[in-house]
Amino acid sequence: MTDKIPLAGVIGSPIAHSLSPRLHGHWLKSYGIKGYYIPMDIAQAHLDEALRALPRMGFVGVNVTIPHKETVLRIAHAVTDRAALIGAANTLIFDKDGRIHADNTDGYAFLANMMQHSPGWEAKDGPAAVFGAGGAARAVISALLDAGAPEIRLANRSRARADGLRAEFGPRIAVQEWTQSADMVEGAATVVNTTSLGMVDQPPFPVSLDRLDPSAVVSDLVYVPLRTRFLELAAARGCQTVDGLGMLLHQATPGFERWFGRRPAVDEALRKAVLAR
């Protein structure tokens, strides 16, 4: 009767749209774990105060989403090398003394999703073409470089942001003008859209994929809709495609394991639970 029930959750603003409570809830129920995962809408002005209070309230950690993923790095007591390199954290672990440890699992999740849904895929198979230069792109680029991608061709609507990533990540990054970005998919073994283009209520993805090699593996981080026009165009070229939902699911596994003591499975049952209406 004296055992504490572990609490975890996700913080952001807004947060009502988050699928994280559904996926963590599925795991908690499936494994019979006594724990709770709670969505919390916390404004930027209250973030520091709220984070420092959570461990005293019984929380063992939280996921972090927009607009707090960069700010939490300045609040955390310890930051992993990958979170520092990416410049954002999506997973926080609280120790018994209330210290906050920040990590970023997005890069791990990208690779895990690619390998799960495209067996045999390897980053070292050839050049990668990446659209976008935001936080998600930073995680994807870091993961691809660590996994041995020989070259990453990068295009962003704002050239300056892409140039900034090249300055940070080094000479394996080749920046391409957005207006000429259709050229960079030619001969690419991996093609990734990290932008919000093609998402519901966002403009469509405008770049032609006519030069895609049919052997390329193509991924879109957008998962609403699950089957984007970007993926449909790639499939029409004969490419194997990987949707963005799996990345969302895989990024949650390291945190769940640390908080609740069990490594969860990312399987079809989880996908169905998260997509259920």
Image: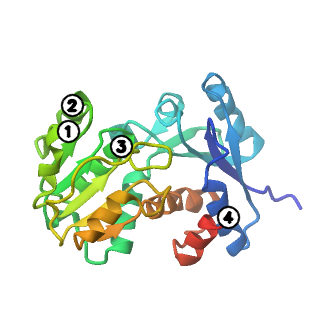
Q: Which residue is mark 3?
A: 81
| Amino acid, disc 1 | Trp
Circle 2 crowding by C-alpha within 10 Å: few under 14, some 14–19, many from 20: some
Verify CB contact (< 8 Å) between mark 3 and mark 2.
no
Verify CB contact (< 8 Å) between mark 1 and mark 2.
yes
Say which residue appears at 11% left-offset and 58% top-offset.
Answer: 186
Between 150 and 222, the one nearer to me in the picture? 222
Verify CB contact (< 8 Å) between mark 1 and mark 4.
no
Residues at marks 1 and 4, CA–CA distance in whole angstroms: 37 Å
User: Which numbered circle lies on residue 159?
Assistant: 2
Residue 252 placed where, x, y %?
A: 53, 58
| Amino acid, disc 4 | Arg
Residue 67 placed where, x, y %?
A: 53, 33
Between 186 and 248, the one nearer to me in the picture? 186
User: Which numbered circle lies on residue 277?
Assistant: 4
User: Which numbered circle lies on residue 190?
Assistant: none
| Amino acid, disc 2 | Arg
Circle 4 crowding by C-alpha within 10 Å: few under 14, some 14–19, many from 20: few
Precedes in sequence: disc 3 or disc 1: 3
Q: Which residue is mark 1?
A: 178
Residues at marks 4 and 2, CA–CA distance in whole angstroms: 39 Å
Residues at marks 3 and 4, CA–CA distance in whole angstroms: 38 Å
